[in-house]
Image: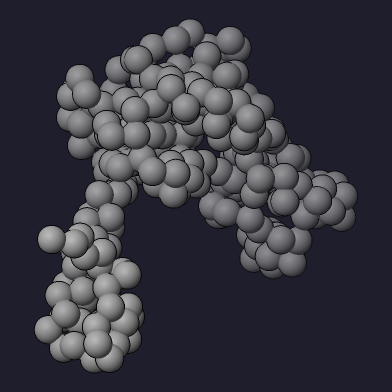
Amino acid sequence: MKAVHFCAFHHKKYSGWLYLYKNKFMRCIYIIFISFILGCNTAAQTSTSVSADEFEKGIADKTVQLLDVRTAGEYRTGHLKGALQANWNNQTEFVSRTSALDKNRPVYVYCLSGPRSSAAADWLRSNGYTTIVELNGGFSSWKRKGKPVEGTPDQKQLTLTDYQKQIAGKEYVLVDFGAEWCPPCKKMEPYLLSFIAANPQITLLKIDAGIHTELMKQLNVEGIPTLLFLKNGTETWRKNGVVETEELNAMFITNK
């Protein structure tokens, strides 16, 4: 008996795809087959974002691979036990280090506040990693919950008392929680400098969010960039995300 190849199958009148089109039964079988394959591929790749509590439960599973996509400096200030550090902002490093991960085992990923881990999760998913779980709110939310952390900070953490001393006696203070590796922070920098140059009576206090995570926790700062405006030591305005000069000017008029 001669072997019959599906794609090379010839009918008396029709051949190949034309035969499938004309033959209703075969066309139905083909559609079901393709739908099944696509469905399997979609179901095989999953990504989700969970709370610190759910994340902690998940990484208790020994098959889970834990990935910290922050910088090495941030990692040294504190990290989750057993996490592989691979800097998302350094693609050469990131690709090299994540190549050691098993694509068929779950990858739990986090950064400081969420944006980098979200981008990394998209990359991992598009490159064949089957199950990706993100820590909602990042390392900051983990610390706010009082979860266990390993590592010793390279620099002394700014305490709430230190912070209060820096703003004491100043009529207007604009506090900028940001970081050098944060693209939105870099985008906002010219707006901040322009605003401060036009309003020299305002003191600009810049706080590195990658280092002073305890202060962020105490002030309920969840993401970066975050700006706080204080009048005589009292917070009167807060905004997360990029703020342009026009919005800063309007804010100052309202909060004088």
Q: Residue at 39%, 26% (x, y): give it.
A: 101
- Measured from the top left, where is residue 133 in percent x and y? 31, 40
- Measured from the top left, where is residue 124 in percent x and y? 43, 41
Q: Is residue 168 visible?
A: no
The part of the image, by quadrant, that contains residue 146 is top left
Relative vertical location of residue 246 with respect to residue 93 in this rendering, above or below? below
- Measured from the top left, where is residue 75 in percent x and y? 51, 19
Q: Which quarter of the rendered picture does the N terminus lie within?
A: bottom left
The part of the image, by quadrant, that contains residue 81 is top left
Residue 88 relative to residue 12: left or right: right
Residue 156 relative to residue 2: left or right: right
160 or 17: nearer the viewer: 17
Relative vertical location of residue 165 with respect to residue 188 in this rendering, above or below? above
Q: Residue at 24%, 87% (x, y): give it.
A: 12
Q: Is residue 181 visible?
A: yes
Q: Residue at 26%, 26% (x, y): give it.
A: 64
Relative vertical location of residue 51 with respect to residue 11 in this rendering, above or below? above
Q: Residue at 24%, 91% (x, y): give it.
A: 22
215 or 3: nearer the viewer: 3
248 or 202: nearer the viewer: 248
Relative vertical location of residue 64 with respect to residue 122 in this rendering, above or below? above
- Measured from the top left, where is residue 184 in percent x and y? 64, 49
Q: What colour scheme governs how the chains and residues are painted in the rendered image of this protein?
A: one colour
Q: Which quarter of the rendered picture does the C terminus lie within?
A: bottom right
The part of the image, by quadrant, that contains residue 23 is bottom left
